[in-house]
Image (cartoon, rainbow, N blue to C red):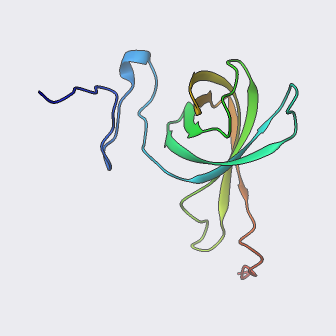
Amino acid sequence: MAAHYPNRVRQGEVRSLERRGQATCFPLALDMSYSLLEGAGSGQTHASQTIDLSSSAVRFIAAEPLALGTRLQVAINWACSLDGGIALQLIAGGTVVRVCGAETVVTIEKHGFKTRRTGGKMVPIR
């Protein structure tokens, strides 16, 4: 008999978290970094990758397990560029609401987009 994993998402599938009252979650593996806004590791930045993303939360792999209630700022390298060539980054602030090992869920309490560097390449000005 095959094991049943109701919370597992297959590649390309969109998962709805309506039972928790949250928005649809999109499985997106995007490069990101996060910084602790308080506590002993305040100001330290860690590289990571998203697992999935919704309008209200982001799930990612943390460098080490984070405590519930920890305030973070995340910077996610956005998949789409502005005007076809200007790289964007989603900057969001939030609180750790769920932890399972290194897998971490942070609520998105405030957010904004910023342009980001493109590895030293010159971005053409239009």
Q: Residue at x 55, y 53 (%)?
A: 30
In the picture, which quadrant includes the C terminus?
A: bottom right
Q: Residue furthest left?
A: 1
Percent of width and height locating residue 39: 86, 25
Image position of 48 with respect to 25: above or below: below
- Where residue 76 appears, x then y in whole percent? 64, 50
Near-viewer residue (124 or 64): 64
**Up-down relation of residue 8 to residue 89 (above or below):** above
Where is residue 69 shown, x and y percent of the image?
A: 71, 18
Residue 125: quarter of image = bottom right
Residue 120 vertical placement versus 81 (above, below) = below
Looking at the image, residue 13 lies above or below residue 105: below
From the image, which quarter does the N terminus lie in? Answer: top left
How many numbered circles are shown? 0
For residue 44, side relative to residue 49 (left or right): right
Residue at screen point 32% across, 50% down: 12
Residue under the image location 72 percent in, 79 percent down: 123
Q: Position of residue 59 (x, y in %)?
A: 54, 36
The quarter of the displayed image where residue 112 is located: top right
Residue at the spot 62% in from the left edge and 29% down from the top edge: 106
Nearer to me, 20 or 115: 20
Q: Nearer the viewer, residue 112 or 10?
A: 10
Q: Is residue 96 left or right of residue 50?
A: right
